[in-house]
Amino acid sequence: MKIRRSTSAAVAATALLASCAGAPPEPLSAPTAFVPPADVADAIRVHALRTGGTWRLLEELCTTAPTRLSGSPGAERAVAWSVEAMRAAGLENVRLEPCTVPYWERGDVGEVVVVEPAEARGERLAMLALGGSVATPSDGLEADVVLVQSFAELSERADEVRGKLVLHGRPMDPTVSPFEAYGGAVAQRSRGAVEAARAGAVGSLCRSLSLATDDVPHTGGMRYDDGVPRIPSAALSTLATDRIAGWLAEGRRVRLAWRQNPRWREPVPSFNVVGELVGREQPEEIIVLGGHLDSWDVGQGAHDDAAGCVQTLEAVRLLKELELRPRRTLRVVFFMNEENGLAGGRAYREQHADEMGQHVLAIESDRGAYTPRGFTTNANAAALSALRAAVAPLAAFGADRVLPGGGGADISPMGPDGVVLVGYLPDPQRYFDLHHTAADTLDRVHPRELELGTVAIATLAWAVAEAPSALPRNP
Amino acid sequence: MKIRRSTSAAVAATALLASCAGAPPEPLSAPTAFVPPADVADAIRVHALRTGGTWRLLEELCTTAPTRLSGSPGAERAVAWSVEAMRAAGLENVRLEPCTVPYWERGDVGEVVVVEPAEARGERLAMLALGGSVATPSDGLEADVVLVQSFAELSERADEVRGKLVLHGRPMDPTVSPFEAYGGAVAQRSRGAVEAARAGAVGSLCRSLSLATDDVPHTGGMRYDDGVPRIPSAALSTLATDRIAGWLAEGRRVRLAWRQNPRWREPVPSFNVVGELVGREQPEEIIVLGGHLDSWDVGQGAHDDAAGCVQTLEAVRLLKELELRPRRTLRVVFFMNEENGLAGGRAYREQHADEMGQHVLAIESDRGAYTPRGFTTNANAAALSALRAAVAPLAAFGADRVLPGGGGADISPMGPDGVVLVGYLPDPQRYFDLHHTAADTLDRVHPRELELGTVAIATLAWAVAEAPSALPRNP
């Protein structure tokens, strides 16, 4: 399907003429040169919403490879699917780019059972081992629980903690934005075991990083430090945490029996999956867009981050179908191993080190598939103006905000090279209800919201890839 | 709970001083005078998100009176609950204001059964009688179906239609905003029966006004014209409509047997429910905020419009709890009979005709309880600037858009008096999945999204009620 449209040269000239009316001429790098013509922006939106292709891709990926933890057979299936999907979408230069990933397995045992208080003895608390955790002894670990709200409190109460289980129980702050709240609480998950072990604890539990009060535990990455004992670590659901907090507030002793058997296996060869729509005039200049193909090993990783992958693929597929091949190259990258290592993001940067100077922009979608609000970026002032111009047509559905912020973990290794990084910004209110849980499934994604994200990404990517001059690089 | 804050006089002076830095002084009516101080805006957001009071009110209303169609016992229960809830919230001058409402009842029979094609004979199609429709003959109505995409097509095919059932089958346009798509399709529901009867049809069906493809039928209001035969009217689910369209596209005859027994009863005395936070300095100047208390007779009307009512009540309750009694009076109005008559909105305007000159602003929340995006308004340019200043703090969660548009059906009768009307604007993408259906239930409302709407409404209402000068009226 081809849309009738003025040539980009004519568009640039029109923008230039418009800017001349009563004002001195502006150079072609001025933001107006980045505004997509209305017919292009309309064509992208109308075609996407009419055909709904992103949902079909999401359904395929989530059913073909519902869990995709790095190193696992699921991740391998996802790589194979991605190659076929990129080919079917008509992308060029479809290829695998190698990276070696860590391989952690959850195992088949995971339970936390109440020992005290007596009247709750035998009750199981909803839990998930944290990604990277070691196992408990095979006959389990039984100990009393000390609940702390912060690492500072943990230090102060170090005497009480020896030989116990520490429960890091500070809730996410509901009064700030969900991502800010996550940032303010995530150290309990990622560093909780190290801090607890330093104080002499034998195990580290944390309150699930969720804004919901429910019995759905949230996994996620954690790490150990050299020289600090490696103690088991798991998340409890928010309800289970609140239950324990209630018992402790009543002065009751809380004692738990905990068994889990995750293990680290040998690193595994894996891949980023890459495909392109080669640029019409300056093919050596590259706009990267992508998400991460790996996920945790529960649910389907539908929002995190199957959605981000298929949005960027569909964005480029749409442009190709509309015969909107831009001046520069659009390169779709499905990164491997964002969740527990970032091997894919690092490998991409290393393998393309020579090309970094020609990387004009990198866009990542990894904040869920809710209604688009805009983008965040590390862009300098000049590039920020250009990006704002590029997304102007998205005001039609309120997705035209470009705010300072990060681009995304996978593309972050390119930041020091001066590549402008952009992160897709959907509505954040529901994301931490299901992030890293068994509830992150296809049915929690709204087809129209998902598709509008594709529209936003396609519009921005096209505008920057087509602009007469390149986006100003970061210093 | 009282927040520490500068007095409003000091705030106004600060705003004035700020505006003087390097620029001529501005009058107090300038938009800066409408910007809520940061401590007030923060206190409203933090207190609301921490306490989550809107959800508790919503749960109460939806479980006390799950259906609230005008004239029904459910509506009566909702009125009684509202009086108690306003009193419990500490509102002043809580009262019932009378209005007489039409009373339509769905009855206990409603079915559309396939007669042809033969292989589907006996299958029931998901349907709901439209609000206001007459019954079929008690032994049913059996006729062939003619599918039309527009009233123009209906006119052209008038010869085929006589003695048949017309199915108005044009889908909502997925490529525009959901409310625009609804506006472009709703005449099929509201006027379909009149147009079909004029062409000689014996019944009028319409495709549910939904952007989802599912088996959930959507009811809603329809009307008859004097002098045109009153034929039965119902909505089919989008799936049922698509099924019929598929058969017809294959050249098959489609014949349906339809029975429904709704009826009009005598009009019933009912009420708007009103309560106030009386203004501290200019109590005679009034900001109205509200939603409609009635709903359709399926589901719980959770989004439409229990949420709107409880958001406005909680907004005022919050301000009272924070000891933020503003200069002007905040008046919460739960309007009756928005869905099938607007008797409450009209009665309010009539009963307060003398006060219209002191109505500074009216805010309605009636577009669902999704994440706030901002507001729409009929405001003149000066008032628009002031409103934009008033919602500036909502940029923190992307709810600071003030766009031209309507305020809401219930407050619309005040428009000709020059009252500035504002409609709360949440994210619209999911609303027409469940509008007027059995699926519009409590579990489809997200507590945090609901609460953020309360924050947006409270902030705007407070800013306008507290501003040193009144919002400029419309001409």
Image: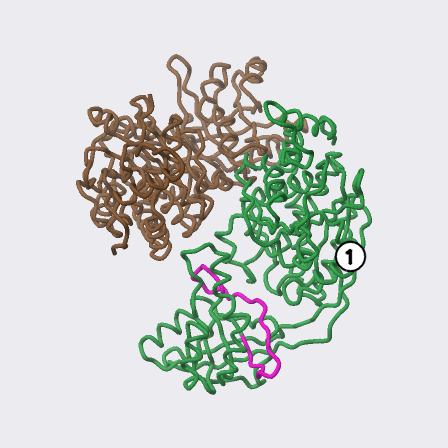
Chain colours: A brown, B green
The chain holding disc 1 is B
Q: Nearer the viewer, residue B382 or B56?
A: B382
Which residue, given by chain and number where applicable, does mark 1 sit on?
B352
Q: Relative to residue B16, is residue A51 drawn left or right?
A: left
Let me know if residue B224 appears in the view: yes
Q: Residue furthest left?
A: A93
Let me know if residue A72 appears in the view: no
Magenta highlight range: B209-233
Q: Position of residue A17 (x, y in %)?
A: 33, 41
Question: Few, some or many C-alpha atoms within 10 Å of disc 1 (few <14, some 14-19, many ≥20)?
Answer: few
Q: In the rendered image, which quarter is residue A348 located in?
A: top left
Q: Is residue B35 above or below residue B99?
A: above
Which amino acid type is shown beneath numbered disc 1? His
- Count the marks: how many? 1
Q: Is residue A196 above or below residue A369?
A: above
Does residue B215 show up magenta in the picture? yes
